[in-house]
Image: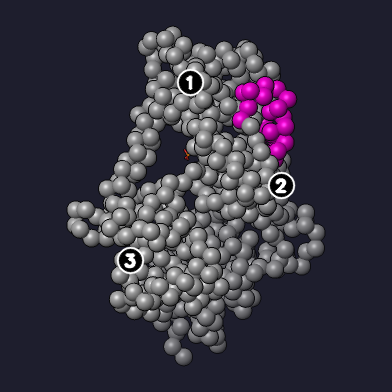
Amino acid sequence: MRNPGEKFSAWTGGGHRGVERRTFAEFVELCQRLEATESRSAKARMVAAFMSSLGPEEARAFAYMLVGRKSGERGKPINVGWSTVQRALSIAEGSVPLDLWGRRLGLLEVWRALEELSALEGPGSQEKRVRALASLFVRCTPEERGWLVRVLTGEMRHGVNHGVFLEAVAAMLRRDLDEIRYADMVYSDIGKLAELAVRNELAAQQVEPMRPVRPMLAEMCGSPSEALSEHGGTSCFEPKYDGIRLQVHVSGGEVRLFTRRLRDVTQNLPDVVEAVRREIRCRSAVLDSEAIAVGHDGRPMPFQETVRRVGRERELEEALRELPLALRVFDVLHLDGKATVLMPYLDRRRLLEEFVPPEMLAPVSRLSDPKEVEELMRRNVETGNEGLVAKDPRSPYIPGRRGKHWLKLKASETMDVVIVAAEWGHGRRSGWLSNYHLAVYDDASGRFVMVGKTFKGLTDAEFEEMTRKLLSIAVERQPWGVVVRPEVVVEVAFNEVQRSPRYEGGLALRFARIVRIRDDKAPTEVNTLEDLRRVFLRQMERRGASERFSL
Ligand code: AMP
């Protein structure tokens, strides 16, 4: 028999980086012991003992492999399908385990190999992946091979899930489990967590007065029902103020104010400092809030005004009189010696109500009906707010994180666009042309240019009718759908205009959804690329203003 190592030498010859302390065989032996152990705490202790013998990079690989995650660092899945695994196994079958250069597979080496083979791309990559995987299998004993398959399929079946792994980290570091759970949320990457733990660099997530932390951020959301379902049916809605973010630190009699980028703006805002001293009753606290400029009529002033006010250091007295700033507090991160970040949003909110006067608090509405959310949104936009922020009632406060715990719902603008092509739908929408390519008119070239797609907004009956209509004006049929004469005008709502290298005009509508079919409009009446540019520039201007003042 030909030496199987020869066949795969292209891969096995490649060296690996990082310090290797444990072999893959030792990892497998641990997995077998875990499988034979009932007690959860005993499992955690075994994992802790093993982990404490690893180098930082090994610990990262260990965490990914042990918890049976198919993905490495976020967004980089181990790209190996079942058929690849089967083909690689059949190649490796029958070969004797190969003790290459007298050295057994290292734990880190296996993980690196999996990362490398899943990064393969382009023509022939499937074949290369099979060969690379086979060359790993060849070097395994039958038990190791079995466990490698479990790693690849993500079904470890040894009872160490994410939670047990966190217990192991806590046991290894002799730290409180809650602290480790919280760090896990902050890093949201179990490999990173294990690496930091082994380095003994897992920072205690202590939020303390006078030490600003990066604020928690919100993700964009398309509709009230999306926000509600994301938060399990009920969500807490606050106004989305068009102001600036202020983190308020109180300690004894001292007050400090920090912006979103942690710039200390205490000096610029003596009126806010004074109001905090006067109105907020606590010994020490860290609060999250939005500061808005309020006009004489009590309505919020436009964002630009607020920024101008905060940036201005001269003639402060006059500005103070002109534009009083009001604080809208919406969160508490620390109170009287204790971090509160781990408490669920609703409990933090109740706490806030005990020591912050109601007029200084952002009002909150707990809702489960999308219609009521729409109504609240309408009222907020009318009074000068940007929209709403939906907050998951159960969520902790995670500094620096943009995620789905907080979702921003902005009032949408609409544009008239023309449909230039449509794709066949899938699932419930199969048989219908349901994903529409939307275009605006470009004055410069005298053509329609595509600025987005949408499959949202039509009823079933409308989809059916639209399919008939589009087929009747089709000029080109493709397997994916049809290209049509630009005749059907629709009004779409969208949340934002964004840069897009994919489209000819360089701009795209974000979260477009059809709000009306505009039979009353001719394609010559649709919006132009210039209109899109204007909306885009307006957005940029607002962001630019905050950049200038490094907020
Ligand atoms: P954006 O700047 O569009 O990413 O939206 C996030 C910003 O909305 C935050 O950084 C806050 O400054 C602001 N914001 C306004 N009202 C609230 C609120 N009630 N809760 C959280 N953030 C808010």
Q: Is residue 376 visible?
A: yes
- Which residue is rendered at x = 51% and y = 55% of the image? 74
| Amino acid type shown at disc 1 | Gly
* Nearer the observer, 519 or 18: 519
**Residue bearing mark 1:** 295
Answer above or below: position of 45 versus 304: below
**Residue bearing mark 3:** 487
Comparing labels 3 and 1, the label whose residue is closer to the camera = 3
Q: Is residue 382 left or right of residue 232?
A: left
Q: Is residue 80 visible?
A: no
* Nearer the observer, 396 or 33: 396
**Residue bearing mark 2:** 171
Question: Is residue 307 on the magenta stretch?
Answer: no
Lower position in the chain sequence, tag 1 or tag 2: 2
Lower position in the chain sequence, tag 3 or tag 1: 1
What distance separates the C-alpha of mark 2 from that of mark 3? 67 Å
Q: Secondary structure at mark 3?
A: loop
Q: Give coordinates of residue 441: x percent, y percent.
A: 27, 56
The reply to whether callout 1 and callout 2 are in contact (CB within 8 Å) is no
Of all residues, the one furthest to the front in this rendering is 520
- Locate the C terminus by quadrant: top left
| Amino acid type shown at disc 3 | Glu
Of all residues, the one furthest to the bottom in this rendering is 1
What distance separates the C-alpha of mark 1 from that of mark 2? 56 Å
Q: Secondary structure at mark 1?
A: loop
The residue at label 3 has a CB less than 8 Å from ligand 1: no
Q: Which residues are magenta?
A: 339-362
The residue at label 1 has a CB less than 8 Å from ligand 1: no
- Which residue is rendered at x = 69% and y = 19% of the image? 282
Q: Give coordinates of residue 17: x percent, y percent.
A: 44, 58
| Amino acid type shown at disc 2 | Ala
Q: Give coordinates of residue 300: x percent, y percent.
A: 50, 26
